[in-house]
Amino acid sequence: MNNLKSAPSNKTGVGFIATGAVAGVGVSATVGGMGLAGGFGAVGIGATSLVGAGAVAGAATYGAITAIAEGDVTAWGAVGVGAIGGATVSSFVGGIGVVAPKIGLAFGIGAVPMAYVGAVVGLAAYGIASILDNEYSETPKQFFDRMEGKVLEVEAYSAAVNELEAFLSGEDFNQKFATLEVEDELETPSGKQMVSRNLAPSNTWKCVHTLKGHTAAVNAIAISPDGKKIVSASDDGSVLEWDIKTGKKLYSFTGQAGAVLSVAISPDNEMFASGCVDRKISSWHLGAKKYLGIFNYSSSAYYSDSPVSHNGFVTSIAFSPDNRIIASASTDKTIRLWGRYTKELKRTLNGHLEAVLCITFSPDGKIIASGGADKTIRIWNLDALGQSLVLTGHLAAVQAVVISPDAKTLISGGADSTIKIWSLATGQLLRTLTEHQASIMSLAISSDGKTFASASNNGAKLWNLATGEILENLSGCNAVAFSSNGNTLVSGGKNGTVIIWNNIYC
C-alpha cells in the first residue's frame, strides 16, 4: 500500500492564495500605511502591496505542502534561489526597518530574515507553478480570474480583487515611496482648501509660500522661537532650514542614516535636535551650521558608550522650557531625558507598554505628557521621580499631544481619527472631536491658547479650543507648527512640500 499522502489539489492551492490575499486586506485595514526605511531611503507599503504579500504567503504555504507531499526536490531549489536573492538584497541595501506609524509598529530586518523572505518568495513561485502545471491547462490570467471568484466569496473584502490584480501585474512595483500619507484635497486656485459652507471662519489664513525641497514625506516641523526660521524633517533623511518670511531654503542638514521622524529647536534659537529611524538623536548649531554630535548612553559603567540614543526609532523630541533638558521618545517603549549641554542621560521613564510616539513639556517644565501605541496617554511628574497618571479613551495609538500655554489643558490626537481634550490637573476627559476622517498625526497650539491646529493624513484643521468648533479647513498633512506670535502656521504638504500660512487679519 502506498503510504504517501496525495498532494493538495490545484483548487486547494487557489484557496490558499485567496485566503492569503484576504488576510493581507485585513492587515492593511488594521495597520494603515506602512513603510520600509533603510540605507536606501524609504519605500511605502500600501494596501495593495499588503494584499499581494498575503497572496504570496498563501502561495508559499501551498508550495510547502505540495513539496512535502510529493517529495519534490525542485521546491527546495526554489527556496535556495529565493534565499540567496534575499541575502543579496540585504547586502546591497544594508539594514532595513519596517514602520507602521498608525499602530506604532517598528522593527528591524537583518540579513538572515531577509534570506527567509527570499525563501518564502521562492517557495511561493513553486506553489504557483504547481497550481498552473499539469492538471489545469489555463493561462495565468485565467488562473487569477478563478482566484478572484474565491476572494469575492468574502463580501467584506471584495475590494481586494482590483488591488490584488494590480499588484500581481507589476503595476505597483515601480511606484517610489514619496509619502506615507493619503491626501484628499479640494483646492481653490490659490491652493487653499475650500471651507464648508456651514463653517463661519473667524480667522482667515492665506497660503503665502509652498516650499519645495524634500523628496519624501515631511514628518515634523519646528519654528524657531524668534519666528524667523523653520526646520522640517523628512523621510528622505534630511532636515531642511527655511526662511519663514521669504520661503527660501537656507541649508540642508544631512547625515542621518534613514527617515527623520522628529525635530525640535532649542528655546534660545541656537541648536536643534532630530530623531531618526537610525535610533540616534543628532544635534546641530543652527546659526553656525555645525554638527554637534549625537546623544548616546552607556548601558553599564563597564561598557563604552553606545553609538545610539535608543534601542528603537526616535519618534519625538522636545526641549524643556528652561533649555536644560532634551526629552526623547522611542519605539523601544521608553522616554529618555538628556542634559542639553552635556548630552548625558539623566533619566529613563518606563511605563508605556508599546512604542512611545509623542511627547511634550508643560510650560513650567515640570510635567511631560506622552502618547503611545498602547492607546494611552501618560502624564509624568518629573518632581515626583517620574510618577505618571495614565489616561485612557483612545481606541488606537496616540500619535500627538500638546499642552496649552496656561497648563490647564492637554490635547491628544490618535490613529482612531479623534482629538480628545483633557484637564491636565485631573486627567478628566472634557471633549472628544470627531470631525477628522483620518489618523491624527500632529497637533499645535497658538501662544494665546485660544486656537489649536491638527494635521491628519487628509488635511489640517484649525479649532477654537474653548468651544471645539472648527475655524478653518486647510490643505496640508502630517505636521503642523505655530509661530511664537500665533500669526503664522506651517504645515506639511503633498509630496514632501511645506506650506506657510499667514493670518491676514494680524
Image (cartoon, rainbow, N blue to C red):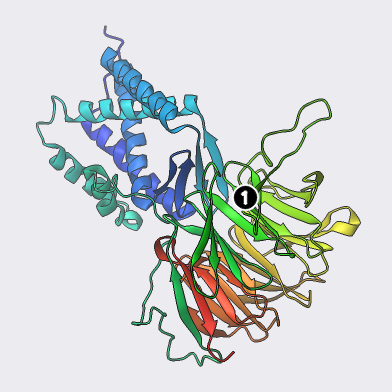
Q: Which quarter of the figure has residue 226? A: bottom right
Question: Is 215 or 46 nearer to us in this picture?
Answer: 215
Image point (68%, 85%), residue name: 466
Find residue 440 and report its horizontal and vertical position in percent.
55, 66
Q: Is residue 458 above or below residue 91?
A: below
Q: Is residue 380 above or below residue 205?
A: above
Q: Does residue 365 appear in this view? A: yes
Find residue 27 and report its horizontal and vertical position in percent.
44, 48
Image point (22%, 48%), residue name: 149
Question: Is 22 or 177 nearer to us in this picture?
Answer: 177
Image point (36%, 35%), residue name: 57
Label 1 residue SS: strand
Mark 1 is on which residue type? Gly
Image point (60%, 60%), residue name: 399
Q: Which quarter of the figure has residue 178? A: bottom left
Q: Residue furthest left?
A: 137
Quarter of the figure that contains the C terminus: bottom right
Find residue 96 and report its horizontal and vertical position in percent.
49, 37
Find residue 234 and report its horizontal and vertical position in percent.
50, 55
Q: Which residue is mark 1?
A: 275
Number of dots carrying numbers: 1
Quarter of the figure that contains the N terminus: top left
Q: Does residue 72 appear in this view? A: no
Horizontal side of residue 494 vs 443, given as left or right: left
Q: Is residue 264 above or below residue 40?
A: below
Q: Residues within 10 Å of mark 1 (few under 14, many from 20)?
A: many
